[in-house]
């Protein structure tokens, strides 16, 4: 009879040890993974800014021409561009960066002004304006546009792209109307 009781106790001890080991392992893995995730997202320098000097939306030929001016304090690397073809959408969600025709280089979900990892659109007069064209066929009539500037900044001794989410440009689009 006592032999059977000891077998039951040893199974309970085995389960308890299994649970304790799994909890300890999960805590160790969590602390290890936490070191790979940055505590703060990198922020763009205050004073980085783009300005839409002119928009020409040709609905008949499905071409969107945008002239951008760097009116900030710092050079800009490029921008993210999103459009919407629904007037009820609050935030444009269609990425058209892959549809650039001229004026920029296609990069990962963005349009950049140079293939080098550098901020090339300077705020210096004469070098601060660029015209970019997009083919927007098969998207229907566009109604809204968002442009988010990108800068390259050194973070932990590495050059990284930083989104200037504090400098978003939002515009409504109309066919044939330039601003």
Image: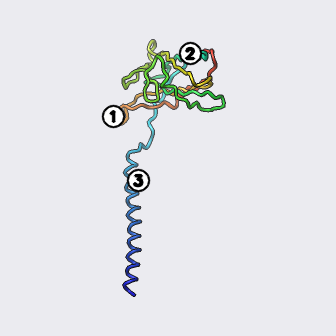
Ranked by sequence position, the earlier of labels 1 and 3 is 3
Q: Quadrant of the C terminus?
A: top right
- Left or right of 112 on screen, residue 81: right
Picture quadrant of residue 60: top right
**In the image, residue 133 lies at what x, y percent?**
51, 17
Q: Are marks 1 and 2 in contact (CB under 8 Å)?
A: no
Q: Are marks 2 and 3 in contact (CB under 8 Å)?
A: no
Mark 1 highlights which residue?
157
Q: Residues within 10 Å of mark 1 (few under 14, many from 20)?
A: few
Among the 4 quarters of the image, the one containing residue 91: top right
The single residue placed furthest to the right in the displayed view is: 88
Q: Residue at x 39, y 74 (%)?
A: 11
Q: How far from the left and from the top, in percent, is residue 166?
A: 52, 31
Q: Secondary structure at mark 2?
A: strand
State the image coordinates of residue 158 (x, y, percent, origin top left).
Answer: 34, 33
For the residues labelled 1 and 3, the Cα–Cα distance comes to 26 Å
Residue ID for mark 3 = 30
Relative horizontal placement of residue 132, taking residue 8 as reference (left or right): right
Which is nearer the eye, 57 or 120? Answer: 57
Q: Earlier in the sequence, mark 2 or mark 3?
A: 3
Which callout, 1 or 2, points at the residue further toward the start of the chain?
2
Colour pattern: rainbow
Label placed on residue 54: 2
Residue neighbourhood size for the residue with mark 3, other residues' Cα within 10 Å, grouped as few (<14), some (14–19), many (≥20): few
Q: Residue pushed farthest top? A: 126
Residue 127 occupies which quadrant of the picture? top left
């Amino acid at each position: 009879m006592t032999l059977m009781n000891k077998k039951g106790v040893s199974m309970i001890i085995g389960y308890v040890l299994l649970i304790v080991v799994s909890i300890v392992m999960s805590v160790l893995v969590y602390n290890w993974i936490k070191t790979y995730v940055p505590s703060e997202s990198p922020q763009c320098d205050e004073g980085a800014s783009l300005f839409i000097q002119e928009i020409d939306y040709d609905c008949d030929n499905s071409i969107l021409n945008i002239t951008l001016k760097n009116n900030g304090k710092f050079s800009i690397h490029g921008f993210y561009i999103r459009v919407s073809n629904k007037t009820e959408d609050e935030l444009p969600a269609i990425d058209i960066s892959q549809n650039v025709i001229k004026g920029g280089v296609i990069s990962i979900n963005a349009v950049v002004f140079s293939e080098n990892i550098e901020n090339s659109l300077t705020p210096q007069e004469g070098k601060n304006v660029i015209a970019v064209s997009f083919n927007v066929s098969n998207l229907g009539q566009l109604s809204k546009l968002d442009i988010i500037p990108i800068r390259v900044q050194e973070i932990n001794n590495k050059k990284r792209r930083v989104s200037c989410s504090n400098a978003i440009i939002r515009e409504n689009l109309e066919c044939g109307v330039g601003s």
